[in-house]
Image (spheres, helix red, strand yellow):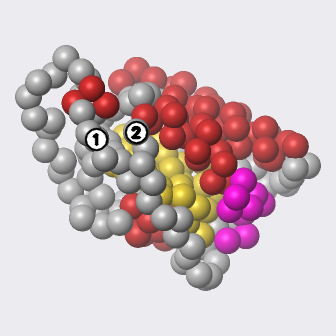
């Protein structure tokens, strides 16, 4: 079972905080439940939120991989199918065969929740990953900057890995997740 780094629940109190914008006065589109998925590439946008910025996200992810051997995967869906964000992310990581140098950012855009999932042997501590989530991912998602969240996160992971002197000699695909206890960080407000 992967090490779940951070989970945040979003309570959207006003329409202006929602991903559908302040100008919309109708109900937001219904979230379509999606079970965990096996990812094959760095970005899976089932919610259709990236528009023309997918290449920009992929470039930021590629820089992180080249510099540190860390592979960041980002999945956008409208809903986590009634599952907790941590369970959904863990299921996706398991189905995808993610390993020691892999990170998964799962975002349910219609529910306003996300989770970051990493292997227990990932080179950064849970506290370091939690810090990146709080300072890089959360602010971007709060402003519905779906592309900005992984772009800024990749830059912050790069900085933390560089300052920790953690440079990997990555030479191949992941070898699967190590079994270990999942740690769940209590839900917090994102807005």
Image side of residue 112 versus residue 94, left or right = left
Q: Which residue is tagged 1?
A: 12
Image side of residue 178 versus residue 158, left or right = left
Is residue 62 visible in the rendered structure shown here?
no
Query: Could you tell me which residue is drawn at 52 percent across and 69 percent down?
Result: 184
- Circles 2 and 1: CB distance less than 8 Å? yes
Query: Could you tell me which residue is drawn at 41 percent across and 69 percent down?
Result: 87
Magenta stretch containing residue 133, yes or no? no
Query: Could you tell me which residue is drawn at 69 percent across and 34 percent down?
Result: 155
Q: Is mark 2 on a helix, strand or loop?
A: loop
Picture coordinates of residue 68, whole percent (x, y): 79, 46
Q: Which residue is tagged 2?
A: 191
Q: What element carries label 1?
A: loop
Q: Residue furthest front?
A: 13
Using the image, tell me which numbered label, if any, was put on residue 150.
none
Figure check: 46 above or below 6: above
- Identify the mark nearer the N-term, 2 or 1: 1
Image quarter in which the C terminus is found: top left
Picture coordinates of residue 94, whole percent (x, y): 49, 70
Residue 150 location, quadrant: top right
Q: Who is closer to the viewer here, 39 or 112?
A: 112
Picture coordinates of residue 22, whole percent (x, y): 24, 21
Residue 89 location, quadrant: bottom left
Category of crowding for the residue at label 2, using alpha-carbon neighbours closer than 10 angstroms: few (below 14), some (14–19), many (at least 20): some
Q: Distance between the residues labelled 2 and 1?
A: 7 Å
Q: What stretch is highlighted in magenta?
A: 120-128
Q: Residue furthest top?
A: 23
Q: Who is closer to the viewer here, 22 or 1?
A: 22
Figure check: 94 above or below 52: below
Image quarter in which the N terminus is found: bottom right
Image side of residue 97 versus residue 75, left or right = right
């Amino acid at each position: 079972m992967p090490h779940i780094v951070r989970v945040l629940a979003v309570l959207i109190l006003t329409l202006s905080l929602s991903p559908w914008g302040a100008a919309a006065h109708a109900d937001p589109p219904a979230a379509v439940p999606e079970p965990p998925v096996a990812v094959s590439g760095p970005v899976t946008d089932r919610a259709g939120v990236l528009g023309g910025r997918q290449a920009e996200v992929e470039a930021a992810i590629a820089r992180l991989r080249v510099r540190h051997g860390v592979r960041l995967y980002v999945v956008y869906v409208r809903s986590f199918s009634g599952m907790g964000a941590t369970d959904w992310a863990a299921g996706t990581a398991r189905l995808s065969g993610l390993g020691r140098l892999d990170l998964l950012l799962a975002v349910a855009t219609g529910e306003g929740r996300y989770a970051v999932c990493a292997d227990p042997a990932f080179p950064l501590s849970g506290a370091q990953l939690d810090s990146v989530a709080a300072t890089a991912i959360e602010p971007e998602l709060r402003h519905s900057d779906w592309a900005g969240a992984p772009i800024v996160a990749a830059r912050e992971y790069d900085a933390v890995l560089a300052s920790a002197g953690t440079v990997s000699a990555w030479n191949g695909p992941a070898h699967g997740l190590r079994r270990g206890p999942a740690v769940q960080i209590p839900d917090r407000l994102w807005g």
